Image (cartoon, helix red, strand yellow):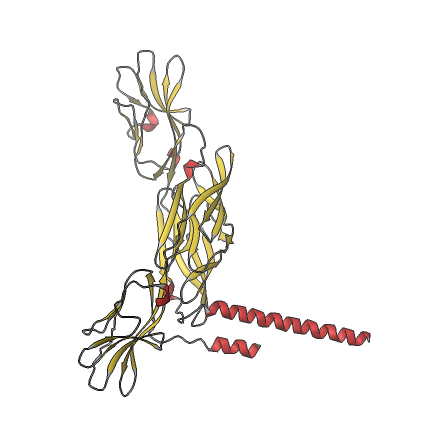
Amino acid sequence: MFFFVILVLLSCTEAEGLQHVFLLRGKDLHLNVVKSVELDKKTDFFWRFNTTNYVGKISYNKEVVLFDGYEGRVEVFGQNYSLLLKNVQHSDSGDYTAVVVGGQEQRVAQYKVIVQDPVSPVNLTVDSVSSGSGSCNLIVTCSTVDSQISSIFTCDAQNCSLVDRGSFKTQTYSSNLTVYLQQDSIVCNHSNQVSVKQTKEEIKLYCKEKPGLQHVFLLRGKDLHLDIKKSVVLDRKTDLFWKFNETNNVAKCGFNNDPVVFDKYEGRAEVFEQNYSLLLKNVQHNDSGDYTAVVSGGKDQNVAEYKVIVQDPVSPVNLTVDSVSGSSDCCNLIVTCSTVDSQISSIFTCDAQNCSLVEKGSFKAQTYSSNLIVYLQQDLIVCNHSNQVSVEQTKEEIKLYCKEKPGISICVVKTVVFSVGLIIMVLAVISVHIMEKIKKRK
């Protein structure tokens, strides 16, 4: 058994110069020959499919011959010997080789073509919401026709953060499914190498801290503009105040009087007489809090309420491959996505056609002021760091780390074979042990 496993491991060698081409089903395939090709009376040029099937032939006089099954679908151009295959289907997936045949056969181009369907649409649902004072927990499910992932987010007045990344159900290896936060939205993302489907939901639809309270997220250093949408009419007995955190007065508007800005806000705040809106310049973190417009007369009436959250831009992210283990036809990537104060690592497995998430890893020193996630998007690994006012991303192409052998996912086959071998060995040891006990009893 071990000898058989070793044979499987050693049989994996990648064809030199092989290029992978992912194509959407129904599109046209165009394959070029980069190397210089010169034909004479003794040589011909062939395009082959899966080694034994001939697609087209070009002879010395530039005459093009198309073989059965490809007439009407294929064009071979004599100028540069490139191949055009129209309306590709799944049966067109495989190896395409350009060969010059004469006294000796010479390969001048090699392609592994993988034809894929567009990914299916995604559904994003909130299965459960449990709320407390100023916070809520969201159990979010991201699903397709054949896959599902659920995660738990906790939200307060300022941010939402990932608490539990949940688990996959019937996850396929032909596409990748992930759910993550991006600014003030929850995103459900389904992708493969040729297509992406996304659904987004605004967090505020599910987390409402206080009726009538509007959340405003603002980048530190920007100017804050707060409007009053209700109609306000002042008279001699009423004034309008802008208040910060209920007890601090920012500005006052009186009947037939110019607006007054109080000491702490002089030079930074303005109130416009036309609609009584407030402008606060160059906001800082200590400006975060509740802003209320109050008409004060016989009794106080709130005509505008805002929760203002001032945030810094998120820090840049680093995306590194900490470890690569594998052969020419499959590899495992331990990917680390990190910032100055947070880190997340995940394991991806890749074969000739796709990369998929195997283990979602764990957070380290994760902060609640921003969200950090690593996920697959088509043929890229993406490290995403975001809050409600900014996003930083780093991307790496999977092919930089995984050079796969054409064909089926031998990676999965080898894992199965190796596991079966180990199981058989364990059973053999147990059987021998039992037989020895029986002999001793006799």
Depth order, front residue of 332/103: 103
- Visible residue check, residue 42: yes
Q: Quadrant of the C terminus?
A: bottom right
Q: Is residue 123 shown above or below 172?
A: above
Residue 245 pos. (x, y %): 42, 28
Measuring 74% from the left and 75% from the top, which residue is drawn there? 435
Residue 144 pos. (x, y %): 44, 51
Measuring 37% from the left and 33% from the top, which residue is drawn there? 287
Q: Quadrant of the N terminus?
A: bottom right
Q: Is residue 145 shown above or below 97?
A: above
Residue 81 pos. (x, y %): 22, 74
* Quarter of image, res 284: top left
Tally the marks.
0
Q: Is residue 218 shown above or below 26?
A: above
* Quarter of image, res 201: top left
* Quarter of image, res 300: top left
- Visible residue check, residue 315: no
Measuring 21% from the left and 82% from the top, which residue is drawn there? 39
Q: Is residue 104 left or right of residue 135?
A: left
Q: Is residue 265 left or right of residue 441?
A: left
Depth order, front residue of 7/115: 115
Q: Is residue 6 left or right of residue 398?
A: right
Measuring 39% from the left and 19% from the top, which residue is drawn there? 301
Residue 364 pos. (x, y %): 49, 52
In the displayed orientation, state which residue is furthest to the right. 442
Depth order, front residue of 36/267: 36
